[in-house]
Image (spheres, grey):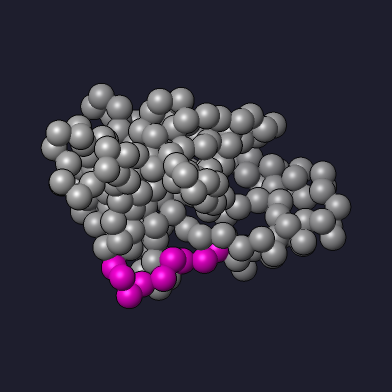
Amino acid sequence: MHHIYLCPHSHPAQALTVKDTIARKKAAMAPDVAKALGRLASGLYIVTAAHNNARSAMIASWVAQASFEPLGLTIAVAKDRAIESMMQVGDRFVLNCLGQGTFEPLMKHFLKRFAAGADRFQGIEWFAATNGSPVLKDAIAYIECTVVSRMETPDHWITYAQARCCIPSSHMPSRAAPSVTCGDVMNSDAITAVHHRKVGNYY
């Protein structure tokens, strides 16, 4: 069974055309290539961001570490995602890592369609990171990030972000360097959920 992960606050028209979109993508890619791409396994994450009084979230699977020094990662963000406007260069967000066997409640919640202006975090336990973005308490780990650069593709932005803490250096513990990374593992016994696909034409 193939699972199609849609952004919970995408335009309603997307739901009406998703089958056509998938069919078009399948037709545009050679079947053998699509099957080969489908063997690229990935984790499951929820990206959260806050700007002024607005909060947003996106389920993500195209996530990878991209640098050691400084610590950095990339996330592919579809151009039609509402959170994309909160992930411009200089913006901050949190990458919440989901756990194998425990990710389904969070996935189910954030896949729901919400009315315009609705609080998408209602009923979800969370706390604010130092950068203001929501940290989901049921995640197994989180990383606070700042967008450094973006690369455009036909249908996604490849967002490169560095793990950064927003605590002023004067408030950091004495053992921490000014470039201290903000993040934590909240369940050391858990492993990251893995997303397997059979074809690479869709999520």
Magenta run includes residue 48: no
From the viewer's side, name the closer residue of 79 and 150. Answer: 150
**Percent position of residue 117, x then y:** 30, 30
Q: Main secondary structure of the magenta part?
A: loop
Res. 166 image quadrant: top left
Indicate the position of residue 138 as horizontal and vertical percent values: 28, 61
User: Image height check: is 20 above or below 79?
Assistant: below
Q: Residue at x 47, y 58 (%)?
A: 44
User: Residue 55's spot in the image, x, y percent?
Assistant: 30, 34
**Where is residue 108, by image quadrant?**
bottom left
Give the magenta-colored segment's residue range: 187-195
Left or right of residue 78: residue 22: right
Instruction: Please name whichever residue, 55 or 120, is drawn nearer the observer in this view of the structure.
Output: 55
**Residue 188, magenta (yes or no):** yes
Q: Answer above or below: position of 7 versus 195.
A: above
Residue at 20 percent of width and 34 percent of height: 169
Q: Position of residue 139 (x, y in %)?
A: 32, 59
Is 146 situated left or right of 22 in this image?
A: left
Count of numbered tags = 0
Q: Residue at x 69, y 64 (%)?
A: 39
Residue 153 in sight here: yes
Front residue of 134 and 173: 173
Considering the image in quadrants, where does the N terminus appear?
bottom right
For image coordinates 46% across by 25% down, the residue present is 89
Q: Is residue 107 left or right of residue 166?
A: right
Q: Is residue 118 visible?
A: no
